[in-house]
Image (cartoon, rainbow, N blue to C red):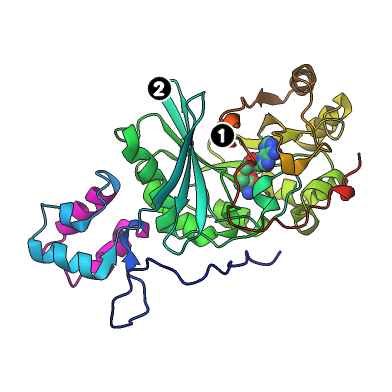
Amino acid sequence: MPPPVVPTLGIPEDLGIPEDGEAEPKQDLLGLPRDRMATLLEGLIDKPYRIDQIYRALHEHGVDDFGQITTLSKDLRASLQREFTIGLPQEATRHQSADGTVKYLFRLHDGATIETVDIPDGDRRTLCLSSQAGCALACRFCVTGFWGGGRNLTSGEIVAQVLTAKRRDVEGTHGLNLVFMGMGEPLLNLDNLHTALEILLEQISWRRVTVSTAGILPGIEAMAAWPVRPQLAISLHAPDEDRRSEIMPINRKYPLKELLPLLARFPLARKQRITFEYILIRDFNDAKGDADLLAQLLKGLPAKVNLIPLNGDPVLGEEMRSPEPRRVEAFRQRLLERGLMATTRRQRGDDISAACGQLRVPNREPRGFRRSNLRY
Ligand code: SAH
């Protein structure tokens, strides 16, 4: 799988490029873990605790201008303003669903756009984060994939999604869950994901952070070696190689027969499980026999299955449909009978196209959608 293509976006408008033509954009401090920030700012600060003051101002107080950090001297504030930036994205649009879900469209400094979804649930709240502006994997059921690949987000752009959403109305990170289930494939942006997690996992327990992947084997192997790992979710979606390759082209490169043994070796804490997301598509993968195959496939793995009735979208056309709720429940019961833990994901934010697989890239031509490849 080639790396995601960087889209041509024309001349960036707002890079903070000074008049004298120096082309380097200013470094974004939001994407730097504490130790790297300390190294970078060494020459500017008088006392080591200044790093803490700056770090907390950015990540706890959510300042958007160095001038607001009044605990620092005027000179230091001015130097920071001259040399660095706080890369909070511009909120282009915000849609609120009847169920309280909020979908943001953020415009990044170079014009690329991403969506971030904020899903309230009682006194808890889940932020669904993007890791790339677009996605190159072209899964047949996913609208983001339909619109094609985009660039990797920087670590700062990943962290900024949390800050921007948090700034709105929530104090601190109480009850906050983060899921990398927005646009993009997080494990194809591994370094920036890892750096962002270094920052985020200081504030939020790894138990409340989930990275969802279509199964990028080298990425999973790399994650297995991280000292602190978030929860892992695998987008499985089919109970055998053929059907998975049909709807997820990435399965040809990283097939189930290599993915599952790798997952069996993935280090987990006591009682921790890997989540397997399984989209139910009517008459494609929703038969009781498919539940049996799925149970067989996951046998012996510390697994829990999260069933997602397919979210529809005009681009999917008539050929892919969601099963009746009764059929979803029958599938779930069958998994339970086979000894698997299984839940059904409640659909949220559908009326504002914020539901799973509905995030899109505006101003981009859709890629060819080869529906005829599906067996219906
Ligand atoms: N690339 C990563 C992260 C994206 S997560 C991954 O594949 O896991 C997005 C989640 O939404 C995935 O589980 C994806 O499979 C699911 N999804 C995509 N399109 C969907 C649709 N039409 N209906 C329901 N879920 C969908």
Q: Residue at x 53, y 37 (%)?
A: 269
Q: Quadrant of residue 21?
A: bottom left
Q: Is residue 86 left or right of residue 191?
A: left
Q: Which mark is residue 123?
A: 2
Chain part drawn in magenta: 31-58
The residue identified by callout 1 is: 352
Q: Residue at x 78, y 16 (%)?
A: 326
In the image, 350 versus 55, the foreground residue is: 350
Q: Position of residue 132 (x, y in %)?
A: 55, 56
Badge 2 residue CB within 8 Å of ligand 1:
no
Q: Position of residue 336 (x, y in %)?
A: 74, 20
Query: Which of the two discs, 2 and 1, labels the residue nearer the N terminus?
Result: 2
Q: Position of residue 311 (x, y in %)?
A: 69, 33
Asked if the magenta segment contains residue 55, the reply would be yes
Q: Residue at x 82, y 50 (%)?
A: 245
Q: Which structural element holds mark 1?
A: helix
In the image, 130 versus 235, the foreground residue is: 130
Q: Is residue 254 above or below residue 302?
A: below
- Rendered-image quadrant of the N terminus: bottom right
